[in-house]
Image (spheres, rainbow, N blue to C red):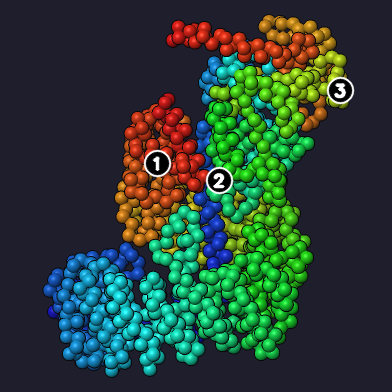
Amino acid sequence: MAPPPDHRRPIKRAAISDQQRRREVALRLQADRRSDAQNRARQLASSVLSLGPEPATEPEVEPEQEMSEASGQLAGRSDFDPVRAARLRGPEVRKWFARQLMLPEWMVDVPPSLDRDWYVFPRPSGKRCFVVSSNGTTISRLRNGSILHRFPSNLPNGARAKDVSGPASSYSILDCIFHEPDETYYVIDMVCWRGYSLYDCTAEFRFFWLNSKLSETGASDPPSQYHRYRFNVVQIYECNLAGLQASYSGQVPYVKDGLLFFNKHAHYQAGNTPLALVWKDNVCSQYVLDTDSKGQIPSQQQVVLELQNDGNLTTSDDPPVALGSLSRDLIAQSGLRVGNLVRVAIKDERMRLVDGKLDLGELQLVGKTNHSRAFADTYSKVLFQHAARHAPLRIEDLVASIQSNSSMDNSQALDVEMEG
Amino acid sequence: MALEVTQILLNAQSIDAATRNHAEESLKQIQEQNLPAFLLSLSAELANNNKPIESRKLAGLILKNALDAKELHRKNDLAQRWLSLDLATKTQIKTSLLQTFSSPVSDARSTAAQVIAKVAGIELPHNQWPELIGSLLSNIHQVETHVKQATLETLGYVCEEVDPQVVDQEQVNRILTAVVQGMNATETSSDVRLAATRALYNALGFAQANFTNDMERDYIMRVVCEATQSSDVKIRQAAFECLVAISSTYYEKLAPYMQDIFNITSKAVREDEEPVALQAIEFWSSICDEEIDILDDYRSEYTGDSDVPCFYFIKQALPALVPMLLETLLKQEEDQDQDEGAWNIAMAGGTCLGLVARTVGDEIVPLVMPFIEENISKPDWRGREAATYAFGSILDGPSPGKLAPIVNVALNFMLAALSRDPNNHVKDTTAWTLGRIFEFLHGAAVETSVITQENCQQILTVLLQSMKDVPNVAEKACGALYFLAQGYEDEGSVSPLTPFFQDIFQMLLFVTHREDATESNLRTSAYEALNEVVRCSNDETAPIVMQLIPVIMLELHQTVEAQKLTSDERDKQNDLQGLLCGCLQVIIQKMGSIEGSKYAFMQYADQIMDLLLKVFASRNATVHEEAMLAIGALAYTAGPNFAKYMPQFYQYLEMGLQNFEEYQICAITVGVVGDLCRALEDKILPYCDGIMTQLLKNLSSNQLHRSVKPPIFSCFGDIALAIGENFEKYLVYAMPMLQSAAELSAHAVSQDDEMLEYTNQLRNGILEAYSGILQGFKSSPKTQALVPYAAHVLQFIDTMYGGREMDDAVMKSALGVLGDLADTLGSHVGPLISQSSSSKDLIEECMVYDDPLIRESAEWAKLAINRAVSG
């Protein structure tokens, strides 16, 4: 029997051998990983500035100055290497992600130029998380780094599908709040998209990108087999009177928990930042005053602080701010160790400044916090909670600030000119 | 002055090895001492009618090999050598060759014809020997029959050898006239007619102009069609071969002749001898190829502009064509399933039927179903096999929606036939058809799979049982399992295969150990199915895959330890080693990608590495390639931990990079260097001097297959990205290479698609190298070292942009390089970038591209450049 002509494959013979397939798969993986490595280098190179340790927060410093100072200072510090971070696995991933979220400070006084430099939106109530889609799956991680959901989604490379356009391992990272009642992820920021970093982009650009890109993917479609949860963007407003009004009292499809303010020019900055602020009162949030471990509002303000080896109790700011201390005897008695997070009650709620720092005076140990808690309270939170109990910052104060800003526009412009 | 070579040439064909070796040595010596004299002697020997035919033939063969070789670089060297011979020698050789035509010995004439074609292939493109065709044709009408035959044969070979562009239309007209006249029914000598018909086959590529002329085309077509009716079977076969060639070269000119061709082919398929009938079927397969391509072009959204319109010949012929093909299916041969190289009318018919189904889709189904229903239960196995074969053949093409209801009914029948039909052919085809059902009607891409949780178990039971059947049936059952598993590759945790993993592995391992596993490709199929099942494992089934590792390692160990094998056993051992390494590669990749299993897997890494290093002791190409691929996978999975294996592995890495002969190994090894870079990062530094030296050598060699060069450039990028500023010392070597390659590829004029594709691969490799180097130097104090090269990089991109032949991958890489240039060099290149046309226009253009990846690359580059220009 003669063999078939060279170019004619008998239909019963396999089109390609598994060996050929292995070869092709290996080559494709190599190409993907190369483009991955290059994208990662691009993305990490550009995010070195924002990925470093949390910057020092000094509330009295002007936002703009704060940003440039933080950038300058971070370049030299290296206790966290972002290039390695991208290769971490397992528990290390948890730690890494735990440090990647941008954490708003609490608004204790109104920043200048609120109407010109800031956005505002009503914050959805729920679990703050990082959502990462890559390699055909989507994973959401809580603030403490633990996994909330692992699921398929319409985000880029968020589900195993035959028609992926581009390397399956390039990833996208969204900053979200998971809202339980309608099982929806509300996207409040976009950090990476298809392997490209948005860390060093301004909030203005990120929100623009978020709105245009997310809608292209079908991520906002209702849930289906390969798209377990819906992703919705929240409506973001210019922080003028109308925007503030809409955010404060407008109808939204989710349960509100206060208002978030983002500085338009700020980059995505891991850790606490004064360039994102949260504010709430009883109208726009059910949870203005902190609850204790039983979910009750305690009669005295309680604060969660971290125990240092000198017995001091500090906030989670960088550098940490000491707000009090525990005696050695008490530490020994209660079996506490360095690094434990402890809940303390403020006995005497009169504020005192000692050497320019807030001193809470005698603290009463309430107990250790539960394990899922990853961080102590921040300085700004302690202040906000204190203010909320005694002299809260009211919506009227925000409105007044915006109104006075617009009337002062002229004089400010003049100032700038004169300085230049 | 001619040498006496007759005796040496005869000795070189002696049965006595010593005599033979001695003669070959002598020939080599003469050639080295005096090439012109040697070639002259050979041509004289060939032309001399008084010499024995054996020495004449060998003289011609050596002459031919002195003019041409397979490897491109050697071919070029030989051509150059011929051109540099003195004119008198060349003229005398050519005269001798032409004289040989008048020889009464047909072998001598035929050999001379081939040598002349080789000389023509070298000289015509250089405008030398312009009188050749004229002198061949000058007295074609007066010469004796055997000279005429030799002349036509030579014309055919010449057409095969030279590019149509180097022969002017005037000469083409004369060639075609002579050839077509030779084919004419009025030609009385069938030798001449056959030579002419075969010559036309090669000359068709020259006939572009003639085929646009209605009268000339009609004439050629009439002569070809008449030749299909010749009484000589060889002429009929050659004429149908011409029709096949015409169908692909001049598809768009065929409409007026299709009715006649249908009649001719269908008569040949039904009545003629097999070689002729096969060509007649091939005509229709070839028309299908054309229409599938055209319709694909219609469907692809980006181009949508096929040059050739579809004439829908297949659709029009369908009602008559399908019954004709179905008839052929009943002409099976008894032993066709055992013979892997078998090709007969039933197989050609089924293959064509499959192509027809892909061409017309749903329309074929109602035309085939009655045949299936009529024959599927016939007592004669031929009926049952043909019906099943017809069904299997049409599963690719029609929509799943059209086929699913039929398959749902047929599935149980098929499973019963596979377990119980008394005939092996029927079982073979049934298992194959099941595989086709799984391939095309099951899996994530198919909306409603015909496979359900319920019937999956039944299917598996039958398939596993059939793996104990005769080798060819078992082989098809393995193939079917492969496609069944493939459909679940994307399924994740809910795969219905999960409960059966253990049973499947057990049965497949049993198959690989069957005494007769080397028959019908059975062992290979079993390992391929095993690999596919591993690929669709998940968190839940990973532990079962893990148990497979020691088993495969033990088998590999045994092949490594095997001693004193015969060469036949050695071959089988090599095959097995290749399969086992391939299997390990798949397992490594899969276990490395499942988070929970990676740690457990790594405990085997030392032993696996140890075994793979032993496998390198084997000299078999396939095994090396497979072992290298497995090592690449292991390196990726192990990450920086792979560093401990490097001291032992390095020598094999170097060997792989030096393997020019088996260039696929070289290519795979270059890829593995990339894997190692990403795994080891700066720990690869100690090995970089050696690797870079070898890669640079490879690039400057003209012996290395060109396909390896683009990956080598990409590999520069991998190395630079891994070792960062340490790449500085290689810049002085790598950059000039990149620059000259960039220059060449930027200005390359691509004559054909293949060349264009290669040029773009090269460009992409170069761009990836630039990206890696730029990114590697980012934030280093040595960044300055790159500034002098920036202008050239930009110029490269500008030139490509101006040339308008970049494909999407190149465009994306170019945008990446623009961004990296700005990102790494910042204000140093700001002004340069502002001047570059591509940085503005290319980016703007790509911002509105359909492909989101390109769009985003453009947006990214713009961002980086804005920063560089403003900062």
What amino acid does circle 3 point to? Answer: Gln
Residue that mark 3 sits on:
A296
Q: Position of residue B539 (x, y in %)?
A: 72, 52
Question: Can the viewer see residue A302?
Answer: yes
| Chain letter behind tag 3 | A
Dividing the picture into quadrants, the one containing residue B196 is bottom left
The N terminus of chain B lies in which quarter of the figure?
bottom left
Query: Disc 3 to disc 1, how far (Cα)?
Result: 61 Å
Pointers 1 and 2 within a single chain: yes
The C terminus of chain B lies in which quarter of the figure?
top left
Q: Secondary structure at mark 2?
A: helix
Q: Residues within 10 Å of mark 2 (few under 14, many from 20)?
A: many
Residue sitting at 74 percent across and 32 percent down? A254
Residue sitting at 57 percent across and 39 percent down? A213
Q: Position of residue B101 (x, y in %)?
A: 22, 86
What amino acid does circle 2 point to? Answer: Ala
Residue that mark 1 sits on:
B842
Q: Position of residue A78 (x, y in %)?
A: 57, 27
Q: Position of residue B639 (x, y in %)?
A: 59, 45
Q: Residues within 10 Å of mark 1 (few under 14, many from 20)?
A: some
Query: Disc 2 to disc 3, how far (Cα)?
Result: 52 Å
Front residue of B58/B740: it is B740
Residue that mark 2 sits on:
B679
Q: Secondary structure at mark 1?
A: helix
